[in-house]
């Protein structure tokens, strides 16, 4: 479930970023395809050679990178947080020591 949430966050980031980065003169169908996935953006860009195709690929590449970084960053933060939680929750005293033995005399 955690992987699905990270993937959804990455996908949402991609869609927002690519929508904002697509040039205004990009045909509507190509812009819509680019918002679906990076693969669809590449296919749409090959149908529009020149500056429109290049700009579409660059927008998709940049948006994909940002979405990927967000998902991996969130995953790393969650992993460290869970590890810290596990360490603090599972901490036990040394075997053979009573509470009375750990106090200074």
Image (cartoon, rainbow, N blue to C red):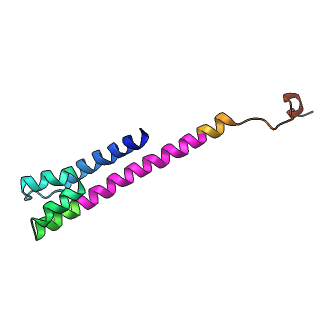
Q: Residue at x 13, y 54 (%)?
A: 31
Residue 51 picture quarter = bottom left
Can you give x and y, in whole percent of width and height, for residue 30 in the image?
11, 56
Q: Position of residue 58 (x, y in %)?
A: 22, 64
- Residue 53, placed above or below residue 81: below
Q: Is residue 35 magenta?
A: no
Query: Of helix, strand and loop, which mostly describes the magenta segment?
Result: helix
Q: Is residue 32 above or below residue 42?
A: above
Q: Quadrant of the N terminus?
A: top left
The segment highlighted magenta reads: 60-84
Answer with left or right where residue 33 lies relative to residue 84.
left
**The C terminus: image quadrant:** top right
Q: Where does residue 13 sit, x and y in percent of width and height? A: 29, 48
Q: Identify the residue shown where x is 54% and y is 41%.
A: 81
Left or right, 91 with respect to 35, comes to: right
Residue 23 drawn at (x, y percent): 13, 58
Residue sitting farthest toward the right = 105
Q: Residue at x 23, y 53 (%)?
A: 37
Q: Image quadrant of residue 84? A: top right
Circle count: 0
Magenta stretch encompasses residue 68:
yes
78 or 102, which is in the foreground? 78
Image position of 54 with respect to 98: above or below: below
């Amino acid at each position: 479930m955690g992987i699905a949430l990270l993937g959804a966050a990455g996908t949402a980031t991609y869609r927002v970023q690519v929508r904002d980065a697509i040039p205004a003169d990009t045909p509507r169908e190509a812009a819509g395809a680019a918002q679906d996935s990076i693969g669809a953006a590449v296919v749409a860009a090959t149908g529009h050679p020149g500056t429109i195709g290049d700009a579409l690929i660059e927008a998709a590449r940049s948006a994909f990178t940002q979405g990927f970084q967000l998902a991996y960053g969130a995953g790393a933060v969650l992993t460290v947080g869970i590890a810290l939680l596990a360490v603090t929750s599972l901490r036990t005293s040394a075997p053979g020591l009573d509470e009375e033995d750990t106090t200074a005399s």
